Structures are given as C-alpha cells and as structure tokens.
Amino acid sequence: MNVLVFADSHDGMIAKSAFEAVTYGSKIAKDSGGSAAVLTYGTISSDSLNELASYGITNVLHCSQLTDMDPQQLARLLAAASGDQQSELIVFSHDYTGKSVAPISAARLNAGIVSGAIDYPETSAGFTVKKAVFSGKAFAQVKINSDVKVVSLLPNSVGKTKTEGTANVTEFNPDCGAPSVVVKEQKSKGGEGISLTEADLVVSAGRGLKGPENWGMIEELATELGAATACSRPVADIGWRPHHEHVGQTGIAIRPNLYIAVGISGAIQHLAGVNGSKVIVVVNTDPEAPFFKAADYGIVGDAFVVVPKLIEAVKALKIAQG
Ligand SMILES: Cc1cc2nc3c(=O)[nH]c(=O)nc-3n(C[C@H](O)[C@H](O)[C@H](O)COP(=O)(O)OP(=O)(O)OC[C@H]3O[C@@H](n4cnc5c(N)ncnc54)[C@H](O)[C@@H]3O)c2cc1C
C-alpha cells in the first residue's frame, strides 16, 4: 500500500507531531510492501527535511510556494501529491492543520476517513482503524471501504521510531489555485513556553490553587520538568489563566506522556481532554476527588505543601544526574 504522510511545519522545522504520523505511515507502507512519501510545505530547513529520513522516509515532496495554512490550497496540493505518488492511504496528524485539511482532502479524493485514529489499522480483512469515541469512554473500530483512505492520527498514539536512511527531497509545486484565505498577521498567544499540544509533559492546575497569584509554583515545576502548563476550564473562565491553557471537552484535548493535575477535581468534562495521557499524577486534598479514579499516581495533600516538595525533588534529581 502506497502511503502519503502530510507533515506540517512550524518556524522552519517539521512539526514534532508529524514525526509520529510519519512513523505510522512508513510502518504501514513497509508491512504492506508499498512505499511511503511525505508531503510538506512552507519554508523548512534542509536539516529538518532530511531528518524525515530517520523515520523511514526516502521520498519527501516539498512545496515551497505555499507558506500560509490555507486548507483549500493544501487539500489541492495533497490531491496532486497523492496522484503523483499513486497513494492509497493519506495520513495526517490529528492536530489543528490535520483536523481542517484531512476532511477536505477526503472529500476531494472521494475517500473514506477516520479522524483521530489511535492505533495501526487491522488489515487482515479490509482496513479497520480503532478510534476513541464518547470523549475517550469507548472505542470504535471503523472499516474504510473506499479505494483511497484518509486517516488522521491522534498524537501520542503509536510513538516515534527512528531508523537509518537518507531522504530524497524533491520540490513539488503544482497549481494549488488562488488562496481562499490570506493570513494578514500572526501573533503569539502569549505563551512563551512549550506548546501544549506538542508537550510530552504537562503540569496543570485548577480552582484548588485559590487564585492566579499562586501559579508561580506551577510554572516553576513546569520549567524544572521542561513541561507545558495547562488549567481547568473555570480557571480560564475567571481569568486566572489564559484560555489557550484550558484543557477538556470544551478546551484542548491532549495526550502527553505525563499529566500532573494539581487542585483539579477531575470532572468528566476535564477528563475528556486529558484521559489519553500515558501517566496521570493527581495532587488533591480530597481523597474522594474523582480524579483519583483516573490517576496512575495520587498524592492526597495540600498543593501548597506538595508542589514545593516536588520542585525540590526535581531540582535534586537534576543535580544528582549532573
Ligand atoms: C458543558 C460543559 C463543558 C465543560 N468543559 C470543561 C472543560 O473542557 N474543561 C474543564 O476543566 N472543565 C469543564 N467543565 C467544567 C467541569 O464540569 C468542572 O466544573 C471543572 O473541571 C472543575 O474545575 P476544577 O477542578 O478546577 O475546580 P473544582 O471543581 O472547584 O475543584 C477544585 C479541586 O481542588 C481541590 N483542592 C482544593 N484545595 C486544594 C489544595 N490546597 N491542594 C490540592 N487540592 C485542592 C478540591 O478538593 C477539588 O477537588 C465543563 C462543564 C460543562 C457543563
């Protein structure tokens, strides 16, 4: 099966989440005796393009003429590349770009689509993909019957696997039509730290912190760990933290390797956005807090006592490790 992986980029680099989609696509191609190619766009450093070779990709199509995230143009680019590569499967990361471009591409290619896949497809009888449904409370196995298939992969589902190799990077600039949107200005939302959606580690806090003035220790713990910060919805609603940190059903859904929840009750709407995390650590004064049921590790204790101790422990570990 020939596979085409769409790899988004940020600030001249292939996006971190794209390498997992590339791992996914290249394994499916290899297992089925097909070839895997990557399509990317924008101004990207050659080092970053060549890094794709370490994830089993030999053929990289680079469209340098498009620089803005215009879903319509990208879907046309994708259709041209999939024709060029005779792709039977198109893989996206289920991130902002993937969520908007994958459905348009599927419609353009007359392809069946599974959004938010969490595992490799079962191919013994057709092509069936597993995805989480009902906010992660259940799973669905979805069979795609169309000749061309589109899958967007939920980040942190299969991990990234490096291999050896060299990439053949080709400029690919087909006619993508006139832009349907023009990005006039891009501004950072203010978060200078690690991007929440790409973070491996996340430190999150809720109303148990009592007020915005107490977030210093959460930020310090995140900085020591190299983690992003997040928060519960009410904390963002009352303005203690910026809205882009709000995780949950109505906020961002994340799947980091480690999610530390401090002073968050663990309401179902919050869990909906974080229950895909590999390891969940909960700090809460209330032993009956619902979050403990979803936790891998729980500390029943006061955040104002526990978090400073965690910071000291991380600092001591870093010193011990040199
Ligand atoms: C339609 C809908 C959508 C929603 N979407 C979201 C969403 O996307 N994301 C989201 O987060 N919520 C969402 N909510 C709100 C959700 O139901 C909860 O109300 C919210 O998650 C609770 O936030 P919290 O845990 O910070 O606050 P609280 O429920 O007030 O919990 C605070 C917790 O802190 C603990 N605590 C108190 N003091 C300390 C201390 N000193 N040390 C340690 N722990 C302490 C308490 O025991 C408690 O468990 C949604 C609700 C609705 C109705």
Image (cartoon, grey):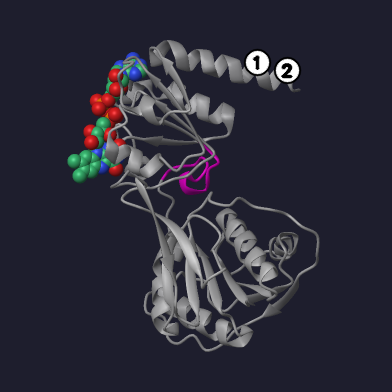
**Amino acid carrying mark 2 in the image:** Ala
- Residue drawn at (80%, 67%), measured in percent from left and top? 166
* Near-viewer residue (164 or 319): 164
Residue at (34%, 43%) from the top-left corner? 272
In the image, the segment drawn in magenta is 190-201
Is residue 44 left or right of 93 when viewed as pictured? Answer: right
- Numbered disc 1: secondary structure: helix
- Examine the residues drawn in magenta and state their main secondary structure: loop
Q: Which mark is residue 18?
A: none
Residue at the location (62% across, 58% down)?
Answer: 19
Per the image, label 2 sits on a secondary structure element best described as: helix
Residue 234 seen from this side? no
- Quadrant of the image occupied by residue 170: bottom right
- Disc 2: CA contacts within 10 A as few (<14), some (14-19) or many (>=20): few
Q: Amino acid at mark 1?
A: Ala
Residue 169's quadrant in the figure?
Answer: bottom right
Residue 63 higher or lower than 237, as above or below: below
Query: Looking at the image, is 226 positioned above or below residue 68?
Result: above
